[in-house]
Amino acid sequence: MKYFIGLIFTAALLAVVGFFYLYSNVRFDAYKIIDYKPRLTTQIFDRNGELVANMFEKENRLYVKYDDIPPRLVEALVAIEDTSFFEHGGINFEAIFRALIKDIKAGKLVEGASTLTQQLIKNTVLTRKKTISRKLNEAVLAYKIESELSKEQILERYFNQVYFGHGYYGVKTAALGYFNKNLDALSLKEMAILVGLPRAPSAYDPTKHMDLSLSRANRVIYRMYTLGWINKSQYKKATDEHPIVYDETLTKNRAPYVVDEVIKRLKNKFSDLKSGGYKIYLGIDLKLQVLARKSLMVGYNGIVKRNKDGNNSELNGAMVVLDNKTGDVLAMVGGIDYKKATMTVLRKVGGNQEVVLSLLSIFKL
């Protein structure tokens, strides 16, 4: 009996020592999630609030706070990824037991039992490689994070951190990119598509594999229905829907010459210009920017037409439109073809007056 008690005590002691050893190795990783500071996309707007361009380094991410995430979107995610999220402490032991049985039968690691907390850890500080050491580190981190953050804070970090395919990081970026919609305007089917993406972003990318994406979304909707979170009418309507998906450039740069000038003027003032989540408001007007570009092309094509026998390879042009009352630059086009031309912005107008882009305001999120 004494031997048995001693064995249990020794095992418990080793478990405690092992826990603190693992914790000492990964505790700094936990604070990368607790004190979450992701790379954020900087956006440029014209004087009317129209988006001119997105600027980012490595990760195109627009941040959204938990209070601005629709409850239905949270339900869809929890339904398909971690139904007991709000009950467990970061680790779902029942799910681990089920997965362990399947792994033993297969003779290898074939199924995980990751909670949303563990998925956040994998997406932020650890690799996705299925090894015992990584799973142990993940479990320790999950315990630490759950003890420091609320469930809502964990979900906020998850929705902003994970990759949704097509170059979109974070659910707000993905909603605007795939559907041209803010989160509060999404349909249930669109939400289902989004929460189905992080499991395999490339495979379920709706711009490339719409059939797989819809199939995955329908599984999300069916899961919500079986849980009783949506009724039969909502289930049928969402299942039958076929959303419009957009395939656009990540930068959405509608005025490249203007954007180049903004970068040139601000890069030395803001070291994190492309990752700090700034919103930059300019004095330009995108409608006038379009007209300026068209007008320049009309003039260019007219000269080329009249000069049929001449060499037009060096022919180029530029246009700057000013508000004669305020001096604001309303439009600026630095060349006929941005991809070929080297930007040559006019530096002087009317004597020694330097062309200024009229930055109305700049602030950080």
Image: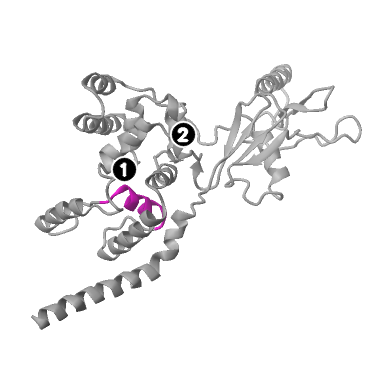
Residue 113 seen in the current view = yes
Q: Is residue 67 above or below residue 57?
A: above
Label 1 sits on what residue type?
Ala
- Specify few, some or many for label 1: CA neighbours under 10 Å numbering under 14, 14-19, or 20 or more: few
Q: Secondary structure at mark 1?
A: loop
According to the picture, the residue beneath numbered tag 1 turns out to be: 200
According to the picture, the residue beneath numbered tag 2 turns out to be: 68
Q: Position of residue 157 (x, y in %)?
A: 43, 46
Observer-nearest of 5 and 151? 5
Observer-nearest of 317 and 133? 133
Q: Position of residue 320 (x, y in %)?
A: 77, 27
Does residue 202 appear to the left or right of 182 in the view shown?
left
Q: Quadrant of the C terminus?
A: top right
Q: CA distance from mark 1 to mark 2?
A: 25 Å
Asked if the stretch drawn in magenta spans residue 261, the answer is no
Q: Which residues are magenta?
A: 114-125
Sequence order check, earlier mark of 1 and 2: 2
Q: Position of residue 156 (x, y in %)?
A: 43, 43
Asked if the stretch drawn in magenta spans residue 119, the answer is yes
Q: Is residue 303 above or below residue 16?
A: above
Q: Residue farthest to the bottom?
A: 3
Q: Is residue 119 above or below residue 173?
A: below
- Specify few, some or many for label 2: CA neighbours under 10 Å numbering under 14, 14-19, or 20 or more: few
